[in-house]
Amino acid sequence: MNDSYDAINMIQTSDDAVISVVLGLGGTIRIGENALTVSDLTVMFDAITRTGSVQGFADALGLSYRAAWARLQAYETALGRPLVRKTRGHGTALTAFGAALADAFTAAATTLEAGLDRETRAVEHRLRRLMSGEAGALTLAASHDPLLVEVLTEAMSAEPGAGAAVELSVTGSSAAVQRLLDGGADAAGFHCGALAPEAAGAPFASINAGAGLVLHPLFEREQGLLLAPGNPRGIRTVADLTAPGLRYVNRQKGSGTRDWFDRILAQAGLPAAAIHGYTVEEFTHQAVAAVIACGAADAGLAVRAAADRLGLDFLSVGWETYYLAASRSLASPALDALVTAARRRARSTPGYRAADL
């Protein structure tokens, strides 16, 4: 198989031996008493398409030309259809039937590609721990949350080298989930406002057991409008954000907080254009709080913890669940420890509370 069908990761063990983890399209086609291995057929289709010769198929499998030709004939006998045809001056090509079957395999591999990439990461993680005793770093793509950042920072400080256990990449909720689905991260931290993931649309609705993923509710957190101390602009409702001269600071497009704010505006019947500063973006809750604290904006949506840290007023809009999702096959003590620590911290931190499990 070539890279279009396989998910391949390379890992280095402690004794410098390189291990290749390959997960690819497999299975069998059974016609009557004949069974054909999908991976073998895929190798044949790819080799002949790429080289235009049966010899290319032979080279791919390390067979003689005669052995490769015999295997090809066995495939055709089992399927009852010719798979290749000789073309004068152009070598060997797939027949219409062969090309259609090859296309079907390619389409299936493309559909499964992200899942294979994700599971390859999980197998690599387990294999590294079995071979070297060290699991290596996990990549956590996550929407920003002050409590989560604190827990990870403390883990790094308390145990030298533990910081490598989980590498945090802060991004928007949508991007975090998409990276997990595409096999670009081992786990994703995200939130959907007042909506459950299955009701939040793409990509969140794809996080389910049927996709081989497990969803951990980490904690619930309170979000609201951060306001200057004493609320000098007298903001009481979202409609007050349209007042002349009032400056709003937003989160970046694709963040869960930005999506929630957009839904709040829609429910209030307010267009985004009515909010002065709607296009002014910051990438973390703490950054939103800092902009308001220094007087560059009057309001912004963020978690209560960010308001408390900088002494800002806070007008609650509701509670939401912050989730952590990962492959069901990913066995990671580091991830389990993170879930436990975050849940424990949430029970004693203002603006947070335990989530329903």
Image (cartoon, helix red, strand yellow):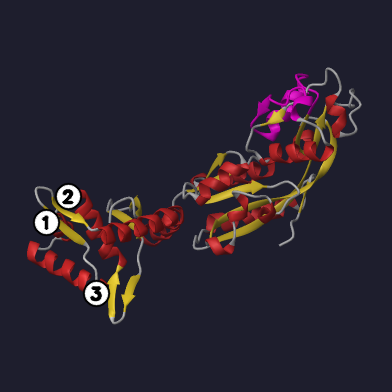
The answer to which of 109 and 133 lies nearer the viewer is: 109
Mark 3 or 1, closer to the camera = 3
List the residue tagged with mark 1. 55
Vertical position of residue 246 compared to residue 170: above or below: above
- Is residue 253 something one can see in this rendering? yes
The answer to which of 221 and 61 lies nearer the viewer is: 61
Q: Which residue is drawn at 79% across and 36% down?
A: 265
Chain part drawn in magenta: 272-299
The reply to whether callout 2 and callout 1 are in contact (CB within 8 Å) is yes
Mark 1: which secondary structure? helix
Distance from label 2 to label 1 (Cα)?
A: 8 Å
Residue 272 place in picture, x, y as percent:
75, 29
Q: Is residue 232 left or right of residue 105?
A: right
Residue 181 lies in the magenta-colored region: no
Q: Which residue is drawn at 58% across and 55% down?
A: 206
Distance from label 3 to label 1 (Cα)?
A: 21 Å
Vertical position of residue 121 compared to residue 64: above or below: above
Query: Looking at the picture, which amino acid does disc 2 mark?
Result: Thr
Residue 53 place in picture, x, y as percent:
14, 54
Residue 322 place in picture, x, y as percent:
68, 49
List the residue tagged with mark 3. 78
Residue 285 lies in the magenta-colored region: yes
Q: Is residue 79 left or right of residue 294?
A: left
The reply to whether callout 3 and callout 1 are in contact (CB within 8 Å) is no
Vertical position of residue 131 compared to residue 295: above or below: below
Residue 208 place in picture, x, y as percent:
59, 60
